[in-house]
Amino acid sequence: MRFTRAIVRPPGATFAHGLSREPLGTPNLELALLQHQRYCDALLECGLALTRMPASDELADAPFVEDTALIARGRAITTRPGAPSRLGEVADVHDALVARGFEPDAIREPGTLDAGDVCEAGDIVFVGVSERTDEDGARQLATWLRAIGLAPRVVDVRGERSILHLKSGVSWLGDGRLLVIPELAGHAAFADFETVVVDASEAYAANAVRVNDRVLLAAGHPLAEAKLRDLGYLPLVLDMSEFAKLDGGLSCLSLRF
Ligand code: CIR
C-alpha cells in the first residue's frame, strides 16, 4: 500500500514534561524541533503531503499523534489513550481528521486504546493489549477493523515490560516481513510472517516505518541498518534521541494514510 499523506504535530513548549518510563534524561526542545523538522522532511522525501497540526503548549505528548487515531481503508477512528493526561489530544486530532474530510468513529469509554498498539500488516492488523490498551479497547477496534474488511489479531504484550506499545517491538516491512525484537520473534501471532529480528542491543530499531519505497529507521543502529540493506530496503535514517527520552518511536510521530 502506498501512503500519500500524513498528519504531524510538532513539540510545544511543555514537551519536556511528557510521559516517560525510561531514565534517559530530559529532552531538549530545540533539538526535538529540529529532529521533528527532519522527520517531516523525510516524509516529504517519501512523497507524502503533510498536514501540520499546530503545536500544543498544554499537551506535552501531542507530537505522538499516531496514538490518537487510526486510518485504514479510507476510514478513520479516534482512540481513547490509556494515559489520562493524553485524553485531551483526541479532540484536536478529531478536528484535524474532519478537516481532511473524514467522519471518524471512536473508541468508547471505558475501553482504552493507543494506536501505537496497532500494527497494520496488509489485510492483517495486529492489535496489542498493553499497559495502555485494554481488552475492551482492543475488542472495540477489532470489531471496527472487521467491519472494514480487515483481519485483526490480538497480541497480548503485557508481559513484555521492555516495550510501551506493541509497535515499540514490531513493525511491518511489507513483503510478508516483520521487524521484531528478540522477545517477540517466536510469537505465535507472527508465525505466518517472516521475522527479521533486531539485535538485543538495538531493540529501539524495531520501531521502523515502511513508507512507500523507504524504511524510516532510527539512527544509531548499524546492525539493523545493514540487515535492512541486505534485504534490499532503503533505510532513511533519522535521529530520534529527544523523542526516545519520552519512549516515543518513529511511527508515533505521524498518522499516515
Ligand atoms: C507516552 O508515554 O504516551 C509518550 N511519552 C510516548 C508515546 C509513544 N507512542 C508510540 O510509540 N506510539
Image: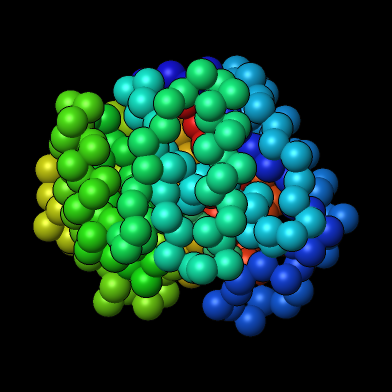
Q: Which residue, as the protein is rendered here, is positioned at the far right? A: 30
Q: Which residue, as the protein is rendered here, is positioned at the far front? A: 109
Q: Is residue 24 visible?
A: yes
Rendered location of residue 219, percent (x, y): 64, 52
Q: Nearer the viewer, residue 100 or 70?
A: 100
- At horizontal 57% and vertical 40% (from top left) the residue drawn is 93
Q: Nearer the viewer, residue 128 or 201?
A: 128
| In the image: residue 170, left or right of residue 215 | left
Rendered location of residue 128, percent (x, y): 29, 58
- At horizontal 43% and vertical 42% (from top left) the residue drawn is 78
Rendered location of residue 162, percent (x, y): 41, 74
Rendered location of residue 182, percent (x, y): 32, 65
Q: Nearer the viewer, residue 169 or 237?
A: 169
Q: Quadrant of ligand 1?
A: bottom right
Q: Is residue 124 visible?
A: no
- The N terminus sits in image quarter: top left
Q: Which residue, as the protein is rendered here, is positioned at the far bottom? A: 23
- At horizontal 26% and vertical 46% (from top left) the residue drawn is 141
| In the image: residue 242, left or right of residue 225 | right
Position of residue 135 relative to residue 108, above or below, is below
- At horizontal 87% and vertical 55% (from top left) the residue drawn is 30
Display coloring: rainbow
Position of residue 68 relative to residue 20, above or below, is above
Position of residue 251 relative to residue 242, above or below, is above
| In the image: residue 194, left or right of residue 56 | left
| In the image: residue 138, left or right of residue 173 | left
